[in-house]
Image (spheres, rainbow, N blue to C red):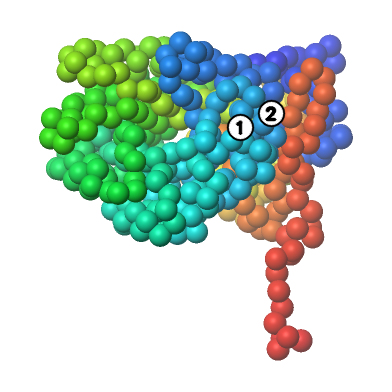
């Protein structure tokens, strides 16, 4: 397993993160346990801030759908980033942390009237309009309440990001946004410009996730700038903001070669600048919305190894005390992860095993071929790069409890999400009187 951030093997041969021995973390907090490396998280935030805000005059909005807790929101604010929220729930978490609403964007392809009113009432900085129904709904609510929200229009630029079909969002055949090609996006611009309440600041796109091809980002930037020039010529409106979304890939396993944050920033800033020069277009303020590339590397999930099953001549299955309930990505996207036996991190490899979760599903596999030393029940498995879309997509399937989340730094470990209790599983259940 590739060691990232503050990871190291200590003198006891144990994996250590943030100065904390993972064996001690398991003993103190139990497993499954998500561990967030605060130093690495801040390092990623600062790299984005320097590339886009400090040296570009733009704004970075952390995509909170990847993982959001009140403690993480405090760190994001502390590092000068904004927040991209996609629901009333994410907005509630951010507000509970005291995050400034004017530094938030609100996304979503089916925002409810209640969520839009919530965003307006608390003063969210930008609402990203996804479709005509939402446009009309927001116009009506704004008219009724007297608000004049600043909005962006989400466009689909028709760019194939070459990622998994489920996480590609910029192609023409997508549930998101107004299509650039065919006139739909231009009609949306014209409609908002006629509004007496909606203030059109710019446009937005997002072409997918876990993208390693910088040419895809360059192409998206070019298409969006071409559209802004067309809109200026047809309507006289000049966009002040261009949001190019997120999607930068990260290292999960051998063979992944993600671009650096700096290279990503240079490519899209250069593409925008070239188009501005070509069209004599005032440089729009550039927004980006990274999620995975900020929070995935700092996250590690720690499991306890339990039973195993040997199929002679085929493979050995080794089960852990978590699985698709805390990491659904292998089942959903065939995602590949790396791992290490945390309490035997220095031991020599003896075999390859298949790591399976404990859910009653044949598809509950975490890692198919993991090199391991001699292992036994009670050993600890650490799976790296699990910060993004693991806890945030977790479930209670098989009535399993969601894991705890701890933040580690300089030898200190603090719980930022408590482990669910058995009582939590039935807290919202009700039995009608007629069933007694």
Q: Is residue 39 visible?
A: yes
User: Looking at the rendering, in which quadrant would you find the C terminus?
Assistant: bottom right
The residue pinned by badge 2 equals 36
Secondary element at image label 2: strand
Query: What's the distance in space between the residues labelled 1 and 2, CA to CA?
Result: 7 Å
Compare marks 1 and 2 and give the one earlier in the sequence.
2
Position of residue 18 in the picture relative to residue 158 (left or right): right
Residue 163 or 89: which is nearer the viewer? 89
Q: Is residue 329 visible?
A: no
Query: x, y (%) of residue 171?
Result: 27, 38
Residue 18 or 58: which is nearer the viewer? 58
* Rendered view: 297 above or below 332: above
Looking at the image, which residue is at 61% across and 28% down?
A: 76
Proximity of marks 1 and 2: CB atoms separated by less than 8 Å: yes
* Rendered view: 227 above or below 89: above
Residue 414 or 121: which is nearer the viewer? 121
The residue pinned by badge 1 equals 387
Q: Residues within 10 Å of mark 2 (few under 14, many from 20)?
A: many
Query: x, y (%) of residue 61?
Result: 49, 30
Query: x, y (%) of residue 229?
Result: 18, 27
Looking at the image, which residue is at 40% across and 31% down?
A: 245
Question: Residue 206 occupies which quadrant of the picture?
Answer: top left
Residue 425 or 99: which is nearer the viewer? 99
Looking at the image, which residue is at 46% across and 53% down?
A: 116
Question: Residue 243 occupies which quadrant of the picture?
Answer: top left
Q: Residue 161, which numbered label?
A: none
């Amino acid at each position: 397993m590739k060691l990232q951030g503050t990871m190291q093997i200590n003198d006891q041969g144990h994996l250590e993160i943030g100065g904390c021995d993972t064996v001690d973390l398991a003993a103190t907090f139990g497993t499954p346990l998500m561990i967030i490396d605060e130093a690495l998280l801040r390092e990623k935030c600062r790299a984005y801030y320097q590339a886009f805000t400090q040296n570009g005059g733009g704004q970075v909005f952390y995509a909170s759908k990847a993982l959001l807790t009140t403690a993480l929101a405090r760190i994001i604010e502390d590092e000068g980033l904004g927040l991209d929220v996609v629901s009333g729930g994410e907005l509630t978490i951010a507000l509970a942390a005291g995050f400034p609403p004017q530094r938030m964007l609100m996304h979503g392809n089916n925002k409810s009237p209640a969520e839009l009113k919530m965003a307006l009432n608390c003063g969210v900085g930008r609402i990203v309009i996804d479709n005509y129904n939402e446009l009309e709904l927001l116009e009506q609510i704004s008219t009724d309440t007297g608000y004049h929200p600043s909005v962006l229009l989400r466009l689909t630029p028709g760019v194939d990001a070459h990622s998994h079909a489920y996480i590609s969002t910029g192609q023409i055949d997508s549930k998101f946004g107004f299509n650039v090609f065919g006139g739909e996006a231009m009609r949306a611009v014209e409609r908002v410009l006629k509004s007496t309440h909606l203030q059109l600041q710019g446009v937005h796109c997002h072409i997918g996730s876990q993208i390693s091809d910088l040419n895809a980002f360059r192409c998206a930037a070019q298409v969006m700038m071409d559209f802004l020039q067309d809109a200026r010529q047809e309507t006289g409106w000049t966009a002040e903001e261009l949001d190019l979304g997120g999607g930068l890939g990260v290292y999960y396993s051998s063979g992944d070669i993600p671009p650096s944050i700096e290279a990503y920033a240079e490519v899209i800033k250069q593409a925008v600048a070239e188009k501005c020069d070509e069209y004599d277009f005032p440089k729009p303020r550039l927004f980006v919305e990274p999620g995975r590339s900020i929070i995935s590397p700092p996250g590690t999930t720690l499991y306890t190894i339990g039973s195993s099953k040997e199929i002679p001549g085929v493979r050995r299955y080794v089960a852990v005390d978590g699985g698709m309930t805390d990491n659904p990505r292998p089942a959903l996207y065939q995602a590949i992860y790396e791992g290490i036996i945390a309490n035997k991190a220095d031991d020599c490899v003896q075999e390859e095993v298949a790591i399976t979760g404990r859910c009653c599903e044949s598809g509950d596999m975490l890692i198919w071929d993991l090199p391991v030393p001699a292992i036994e029940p009670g050993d600890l498995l650490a799976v790296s790069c699990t910060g993004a879309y693991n806890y945030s997509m977790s479930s209670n399937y098989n009535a399993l409890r969601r894991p705890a989340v701890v933040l580690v730094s300089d030898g200190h470990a603090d719980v930022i999400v408590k482990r669910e209790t058995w009582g939590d599983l039935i807290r919202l259940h009700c039995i009608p009187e007629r069933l007694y």
